[in-house]
């Protein structure tokens, strides 16, 4: 028996962020810089913005869960599969570095994804890679991700805790939480962090990934230090999306490779011993013209799916029906407050369905999946 809610349920998917995203005006409200600056009129520098409420005028029509997921499963080539195919530890490590760079996507100035509600999920597949995300905390916002490829014996576990702060002429978002990529056939686990997202308002508005990204494999002793940022103070000259770094042996500190390039163009790897240079990442080939996810099994889509929860709001934003968008966003938020009050009245503590969560002041947020493998999803990404 199909309920009335299921009959009217909207599963609405939008195109992924890609190399062309910045030139896309579909999501932008008029006079965006003026509107953005007006947001922070009464906000003190250094303020934590995790509880900051955004009008739909400043939302991209997708949840932060979908953005995290897309950076893993929306890609034109199988860079994740290449990590597993390397014959030597060095080959696999450089492939992991290349894949890590591919997870960066150009963000659009002046707009941000929806802050996911507690218990929201996003479940999508690309080929044999199945990805599941769940919002395991709302205040503060924390997202857990589990991705597996059972055929290639690859597993990924992320715990993302973004903390945006206002600094007068900029907003800096630090993404806390450990990220692990496991190549189970080789018994190797790669631990990594994420660079910061920096939004500058003045003198020129722009948004960019900045800071240090470290990748290490304890089993092989290989480690990488990558530095993302601008080639000038304000990003006015050169390419602001530079990446420089090195791969070295952590036991001897011997530098094996040097890395240099732009993550929105090409990145080269130089073998220090031989001087040979190789292009290890081409953004145009990997994240240009990405295909949108599609619903392959409408009945299998959970009510907690991002594309269901925010479907009507996303439609309103794309139609630039801002009055309807405000109503839809308010309805989602009010429903969450009501569920919170009901749990409090019953003395219940909410628990994630798909992850075991741990938190400590020393180690921060950590998560582990309940199931070994992520099942195929009702939402899939066509393979080029």
Image (cartoon, rainbow, N blue to C red):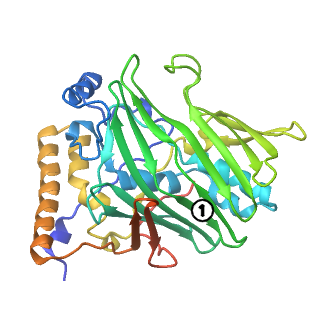
Q: Would residue 222 be visible to someone looking at this image?
A: yes
Looking at the rendering, in which quadrant would you find the N terminus? bottom left
* Observer-nearest of 69 and 379: 69
- 271 left or right, relative to 146: right
Asked which secondary structure carries label 1, the reply is: strand
Residue linked to disc 1: 181
Q: How many numbered discs, if any?
A: 1
Q: Would residue 296 be visible to someone looking at this image?
A: no
- 187 left or right, relative to 162: right
* Observer-nearest of 368 and 260: 368
- 100 left or right, relative to 206: right
Quadrant assignment, res 203: top left
Relative to 159, residue 164 above or below: above
Q: Residue at x 45, y 64 (%)?
A: 366
Relative to 195, residue 187 above or below: below
- 282 left or right, relative to 207: right
Relative to 129, residue 348 above or below: below
- Can you give x and y, in whole percent of width and height, for residue 224 in the image? 68, 48
Q: Residue furthest right?
A: 274
- Can you give x and y, in whole percent of width and height, for residue 76 in the image? 58, 50
* Observer-nearest of 88 and 298: 88
Quadrant assignment, res 78: bottom right
Q: Residue at x 60, y 39 (%)?
A: 283
Q: Residue furthest front?
A: 362
Query: Mark 1: few, some, or many residues within 10 Å (few <14, many ≥20)?
Result: many
Q: Residue at x 48, y 37 (%)?
A: 106
- Can you give x and y, in whole percent of width and height, for residue 268 in the image? 73, 37
Q: Residue at x 16, y 39 (%)?
A: 321
- Can you give x and y, in whole percent of width and height, for residue 102 in the image? 58, 46
């Amino acid at each position: 028996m199909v309920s009335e809610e299921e009959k009217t349920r909207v599963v609405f998917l939008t195109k992924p962020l890609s190399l062309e995203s910045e030139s896309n005006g579909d999501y932008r409200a008029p006079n965006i810089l003026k509107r953005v600056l007006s947001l922070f009129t009464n906000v003190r520098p250094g303020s934590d913005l995790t509880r900051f409420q955004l009008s739909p005028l400043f939302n991209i029509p997708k949840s932060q869960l979908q953005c995290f997921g897309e950076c893993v499963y929306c890609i034109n080539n199988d860079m994740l599969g290449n990590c597993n195919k390397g014959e030597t530890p060095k080959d696999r490590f450089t492939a992991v570095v290349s894949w890590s760079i591919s997870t960066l996507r150009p963000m659009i100035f002046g707009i941000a994804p929806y802050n996911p509600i507690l218990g929201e999920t996003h479940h999508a597949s690309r080929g044999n890679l199945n990805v599941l995300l769940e919002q395991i905390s709302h205040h503060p916002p924390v997202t857990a991700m589990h991705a597996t490829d059972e055929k290639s014996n690859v597993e990924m576990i992320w715990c993302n805790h973004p903390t945006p702060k206002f600094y007068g002429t900029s907003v800096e978002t630090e993404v806390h939480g450990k990220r692990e990529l496991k190549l189970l056939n080789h018994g190797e686990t790669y631990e990594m962090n994420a660079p910061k997202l920096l939004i500058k308002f003045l003198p020129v508005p722009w948004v960019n990934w900045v800071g240090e990204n470290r990748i290490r494999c304890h089993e092989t002793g290989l480690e990488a230090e990558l530095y993302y940022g601008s080639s000038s103070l304000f990003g006015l000259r050169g390419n602001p999306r530079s990446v420089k770094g090195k791969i070295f042996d952590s036991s001897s500190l011997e530098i094996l490779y040097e890395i240099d390039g732009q993550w929105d163009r090409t990145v080269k790897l130089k073998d220090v011993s031989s001087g040979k240079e190789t292009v290890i990442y081409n953004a145009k080939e990997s994240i240009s013209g990405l295909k949108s996810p599609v619903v392959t099994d409408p009945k299998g889509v959970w009510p907690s799916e991002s594309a269901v929860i925010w479907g009507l709001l996303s439609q309103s934003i794309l139609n630039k029906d801002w009055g309807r968008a405000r109503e839809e966003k308010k309805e989602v938020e009010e429903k969450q407050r009501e569920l919170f009050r009901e749990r409090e009245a019953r003395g219940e503590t909410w628990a994630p369905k798909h992850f075991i969560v741990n938190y400590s002041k020393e180690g921060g947020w950590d998560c582990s999946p309940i199931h070994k493998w992520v099942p195929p999803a009702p939402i899939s990404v066509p393979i080029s």
